[in-house]
């Protein structure tokens, strides 16, 4: 085996390991690392602007994936502190690279269920149906009443939507909630 063949084999193994890690974390969380498109990020930004956040806000992006939404939030709210949390290593490191020149972004690697979100002025997420009920419980425990929460495509089924944008991408609409946003008993 030549040096070139060895380098090719090592490169292939690294790529396979990275792809396998994405699949493993997808199986573990039930959420693939999706990337928000420009229309979707614009909808999230518009709803957060409608929420009239304080200038020095702390905005969490739960499951920040490849960093597209974090970048859009950082640019739209340059005085805010954008905190992305991603569990999957490959998307996390790619988003770290993509946000390296954005001083108002701080990324964390790990499960957002293990983070204290009590200082949040707003929360965004682009997840799937599976984690939404558990996430609602976490937000109930952590967030101050009235905290804006914007969910892209996958809504909280038992919560009252304050506003929505129907133009979001292929997967549906974006919803704004003011937490805890519980529906009135009927």
Image (cartoon, grey):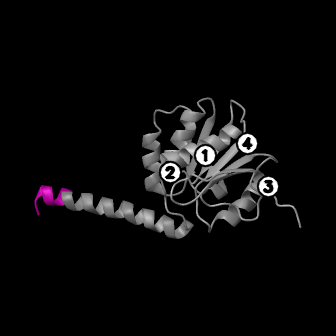
- Labels 3 and 4: the sequence-earlier one: 4
Contact between labelled residues 1 and 2, with CB atoms less than 8 Å apart: yes
Percent across and percent down for residue 63 are 57, 54
Q: Is residue 117 visible?
A: no
Looking at the rendered structure, which numbered label has been put on residue 44?
1
Contact between labelled residues 2 and 3, with CB atoms less than 8 Å apart: no
Along the horizontal axis of the image, is 91 left or right of 87?
A: left
Q: Which residues are magenta?
A: 1-7
Residue at x 11%, y 64% (from the top left corner): 1
> Secondary structure beneath disc 4?
loop
Residue neighbourhood size for the residue with mark 2, other residues' Cα within 10 Å, grouped as few (<14), some (14–19), many (≥20): many
Which residue bears the numbered disc 2?
A: 36
Contact between labelled residues 3 and 1, with CB atoms less than 8 Å apart: no
Alpha carbons under labels 3 and 4: distance apart: 18 Å
Residue at x 69%, y 35% (from the top left corner): 57
Residue neighbourhood size for the residue with mark 3, other residues' Cα within 10 Å, grouped as few (<14), some (14–19), many (≥20): many
Percent across and percent down for residue 108 are 56, 47
């Amino acid at each position: 085996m030549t040096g070139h063949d060895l380098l090719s084999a090592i490169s292939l193994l690294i790529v396979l390991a990275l792809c396998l890690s994405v699949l493993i974390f997808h199986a573990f969380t039930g959420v693939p690392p999706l990337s928000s498109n420009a229309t979707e990020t614009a909808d999230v930004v518009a709803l957060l602007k409608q929420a009239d956040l304080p200038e020095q806000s702390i905005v969490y992006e739960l499951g920040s994936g490849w960093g597209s939404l974090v970048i859009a939030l950082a640019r739209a709210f340059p005085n805010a502190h954008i905190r992305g949390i991603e569990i999957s290593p490959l998307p996390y490191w790619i988003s770290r690279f993509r946000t390296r020149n954005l001083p108002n972004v701080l990324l964390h690697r790990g499960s957002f269920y293990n983070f204290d979100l009590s200082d949040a002025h707003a929360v965004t997420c682009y997840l799937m149906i599976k984690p939404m009920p558990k996430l609602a419980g976490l937000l109930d425990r952590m967030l101050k009443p009235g905290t804006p929460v914007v969910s892209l495509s996958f809504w909280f089924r038992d919560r009252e939507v304050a506003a929505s944008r129907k133009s979001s991408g292929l997967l549906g609409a974006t919803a704004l909630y003011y937490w805890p946003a519980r529906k009135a008993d009927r």
